[in-house]
Amino acid sequence: MSRPLEDVLFGAPGARPRTGTRVASWLAGAALLALAAGVVVGFGSAGQLDARLWRLFTQASTWTFLADGLLGTLASAAMAAVIALGFGLVLLLGRLARPRLVRWPSVALIEFLRGTPTLLLIYVCFLVLPPLGIQLSTYWMLTLPVGLSTAAVVAEVYRAGVLAVPRGQTDAARSLGLTEAQVFFHIVFPQALRYIVPALVAQLVIVVKDTTFGYVVTYGELMQNARVLIANHQSLVPVYLVVALLYCAVNYGISRASRRLGRPLH
């Protein structure tokens, strides 16, 4: 007897699908381990895992230099996140506004910033603005483009959350005599945040990654300092491995913090 379509699509998987999923997971895990082993063997045969290349990590100056770069990354990423979250909200309000003179420019700006690569915006700040008499520090040459580029995406994330709020919530709030601003900021937006926390976290992780464009303006972020270490010590793989672990630690910290912030919303 065939199972109903709803049970097939949404019901709990049977014994055979669970077994197949388990086998596929084991095979995928084995393939990843084999790939990792192959990469390690390749690095070893190329001499990139020799002890002499790791000696620089026994020096306190190396860790101080990397720490300075990490602080530069965090400083730029934090300000870019503030710009993205704040300006993204402004763009959202403009896109949801009823007057076309407000809505259309907001939509155009969102689409422009979403479609323009962050690297191109950095080049504009670095090469185009100085001849026009607008001088920015290397910090803002990196932070401002990253923040603006992310703000356009965040605005769309906000909008998805707002549209996910049931219409009855706004109708009930209006029936109580609340203004449109009160309905949005007290009823709609707090509920929308509950839906979009994972997407916002993903964007914050992307912000941290985008700070690696700091090399364009020679801003002292983590990757820029890593390049300096590689140039001075010819230790390519060890430095990049350590830097990759530092980035993973930062992004894991962002994910953990987002879980704590998201608890009161549930």
Image: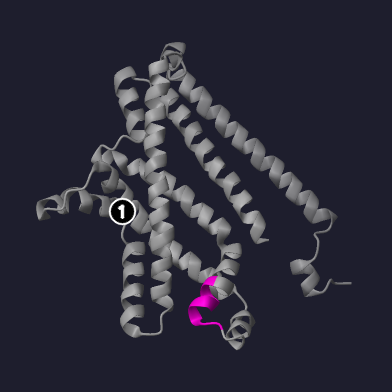
Q: Main secondary structure of the magenta part?
A: helix
Q: Secondary structure at mark 1?
A: helix
Quarter of the image containing the N terminus? Answer: bottom right
Q: Residue at the far front: name it.
A: 177
**In the depicted structure, whether residue 176 falls above or below residue 197:** below
**In the depicted structure, whether residue 70 falls above or below residue 91:** above
Q: Amino acid at mark 1?
A: Pro
Query: Residue drawn 60% across and 37% down?
Result: 32
Residue 158 in the image: state x and y as whole percent. 49, 67
Q: Nearer the viewer, residue 218 or 38?
A: 218
Q: Residue at the far bottom: name it.
A: 175
**In the depicted structure, whether residue 237 falls above or below residue 147:** above
Residue 81 in the image: state x and y as whole percent. 42, 52
Asked where in the image residue 62 lies, by quadrant, the reply is top left
Q: How is the image coloured?
A: one colour
Quarter of the image containing the C terminus? Answer: bottom right
Using residue 162 as the reference point, say whether residue 59 is left or right of it. Answer: left
Using residue 194 as the reference point, say whether residue 210 is left or right of it. Answer: left
Magenta region includes residue 123: no
Query: Residue drawn 51% across and 82% down?
Result: 179
Q: Nearer the viewer, residue 190 or 29?
A: 190
Q: How many marks?
A: 1
Please give the range of residues in magenta: 178-185
Residue 231 in the image: state x and y as whole percent. 29, 23
Query: Residue drawn 32% across and 73% down?
Result: 108
Identify the residue under disc 1.
145
Query: Residue drawn 50% across and 39% down?
Result: 250
Using residue 44 as the reference point, say whether residue 146 is left or right of it. Answer: left
